[in-house]
Amino acid sequence: MREIDDKVKDGLSQLDRVDVQSPTKEDIIALIQKTKRKQRREAILFFIVTLILVNIVVFSIARLPAIYVTMNIILIGLLPVLLVLGLVKRWRDRYE
Amino acid sequence: MEEPLEVLIQKAQKGEEEALAVLLTDHYDRVYRFLLKITFDPDYAAELTQETMTKAIIAIKSYKMKKAAFSTWLFQIATNVFIDKKRKKKHEDEYVRMQRLQWSMKEEPHTEWLDIQDVLMKLDRKKRIPLLLKHYYGYSYEEVGRICQIRIGTAKSRVNSAVDFIRKELKHDEGNRR
């Protein structure tokens, strides 16, 4: 067992000779910001798609004209989201 | 002055980018080397390390200090990333991979190492990762089980089976040389 242990350790430690190009702290900060932006974008997209789908299903069950679906999506979904995004952007421009 | 790990983790979980960046930069090499030992491919290991870092950024708030060390948590993410990608990635030519690995090493590796690497490459990844964690990094079976998300008994049997396989293969190689 010990012999195997040593051989595995020796063999694998040879791999530590491979040069690593470690990123700098700035690179990682850029990656963090990129990831957060992507996450935010995905969350908004998820919200919009869910909103549209739920509305279509509810309004089609209620047999209402398509114009109501559009109006409802704009009123209860997109306008508040755009308003919040606008506020966040203004807040960021001011404080960051 | 450098801040203790616990403080950095707490700050990172509160959303401080600088603290999270320090944490990830400090652990980058360790994660890369771990993935290199699983994949034997420097470029692929770098790609997986980048993805591990991205997953860690997303999941940092869910990390619990009492449950596992930060590096253990990163190894767990890296193992999952490797397994997920492996399902998608096509099997690559072992010879090309070996050449690329040797090319990226600073000196020419000795033949005995090439034998053991050959054997490890033949080993199924399900057994290779527990073996690496137990016999190279010195993790307990409980930690191996947590990282690989398997039961302790399964971890033990996989490590034992991997050791048996290596023993047989090395004996076989020696026999062939004689």
Image (cartoon, rainbow, N blue to C red):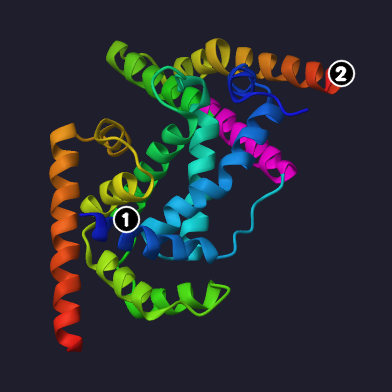
Q: Amino acid at mark 2?
A: Arg
Q: Secondary structure at mark 2?
A: helix
Q: Residue at label 2?
A: A94
Q: Chain of mark 2?
A: A
Disc sitting over residue B115 in the figure? none
Q: Residue at label 1?
A: B86
Q: Depth-wise, is mark 2 or mark 1 nearer the camera?
A: 1
At 29% from the left edge and 35% from the top edge, which residue is drawn?
B140
Residue A42 visible to the viewer: no
The quarter of the picture where the N terminus of chain B appears is top right
Horizontal placement of B23 versus B158: left or right? right
At 33% from the left edge and 36% from the top edge, which residue is drawn?
B147
Residue B50: x and y, percent?
54, 48
**Foreground of the two, A77 or A88:** A88
Bounds of the magenta segment:
A25-44
Q: Residues within 10 Å of mark 2 (few under 14, many from 20)?
A: few
Q: In the figure, B27 relative to B131: above or below?
A: above
**Foreground of the two, B26 or A95:** B26
Residue B90: x and y, percent?
31, 65
Residue A49 among those drawn in magenta: no
**Foreground of the two, A84 or B130:** B130
Residue A28 among those drawn in magenta: yes
Residue B82 visible to the viewer: yes
At 30% from the left edge and 44% from the top edge, which residue is drawn?
B134
